[in-house]
Amino acid sequence: MSRPAPILELIDVHAAYGRIEVLRGVDLVVARGAVVALLGPNGAGKTTLLRVLSGLMRPTAGDIHLAGVHVSGASPDRLTRAGLCLVPEGRGVFPNLTVEENLWLASSAGVAVEQILTQAYARFPRLKQRRRQLAGSLSGGEQQMLSLARALASDPALLLLDELSMGLAPLIVEGLYDTVAEIAERGVSILVVEQFASSALRVADYAAVMQGGRIVATGEPAEIENRLTDLYFGGAA
């Protein structure tokens, strides 16, 4: 019996800003239902890779397959319809709208508002307490909860998370990653990009390290954690 195609497969993907090549032949696989932690120092190419995957930037070479379908260079709308959803670095909420109004906007994906609100408040009770509050006045952790709730409203098959922990206290980060683990248990595949590795590795099934625009190591989370210092500062050596 043949195994199902991975939810995401990248083969020799390149991307550049003008003449400056940032991705230099990325190979990566995300299995269905898996959490993959993509780690690496600043400037490794992690966020550029997410921009390419979400259709915000076109690759200059290579192949990207989403659920077995070739999607290199596809538009963000097409990728969203195919089940991909990005939670960008910086939390991406509408600060001058209330929490509830931010969630209403997610209904543009075709899901009933009542269903969105019920699911969001069940997963993040604090959002219900803050539902009349402007999103811009929330704490950083609450804004990240709101971003996740909006992303999950579209019922994604693959969730891309960019620097979930940025600017947050360690205790808040641990709680958010507990939520990531719960989301994965419900069958959502997740690629999480992090500079600070410990929380992501705690919930990951598999990990990869980027350095200089390439994947320089892949393996089990414990194996990668033991090698992180050398990988960050010594490349693939």
Image (cartoon, rainbow, N blue to C red):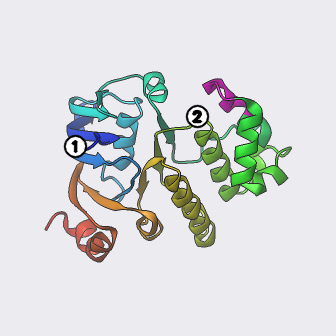
Q: State the extent of the magenta-drawn residues as a range.
A: 104-111
For residue 193, above or below residue 100 = below
Question: Where on the picture, by quarter, is residue 3?
Answer: top left
Q: Residue at x 32, y 40 (%)?
A: 8
Q: Position of residue 74 (x, y in %)?
A: 36, 23
Number of marks in the rendered image: 2
Q: Give the residue pinned by disc 2.
A: 154
Residue 94 visible in the snapshot: yes
Q: Nearer the viewer, mark 2 or mark 1?
A: 1
Q: Residue at x 56, y 48 (%)?
A: 90
For residue 133, above or below residue 173 = above
Q: Residue at x 29, y 41 (%)?
A: 4
Q: Residue furthest left?
A: 237
- Give amino acid for label 2: Ser
Q: Give the residue pinned by disc 1.
A: 1
Q: Position of residue 189 (x, y in %)?
A: 43, 47
Element under label 1?
A: loop
Residue at mark 2 to residue at mark 1: CA–CA distance:
31 Å
In-image side of 15 versus 107 (left or right): left
- Give amino acid for label 1: Met
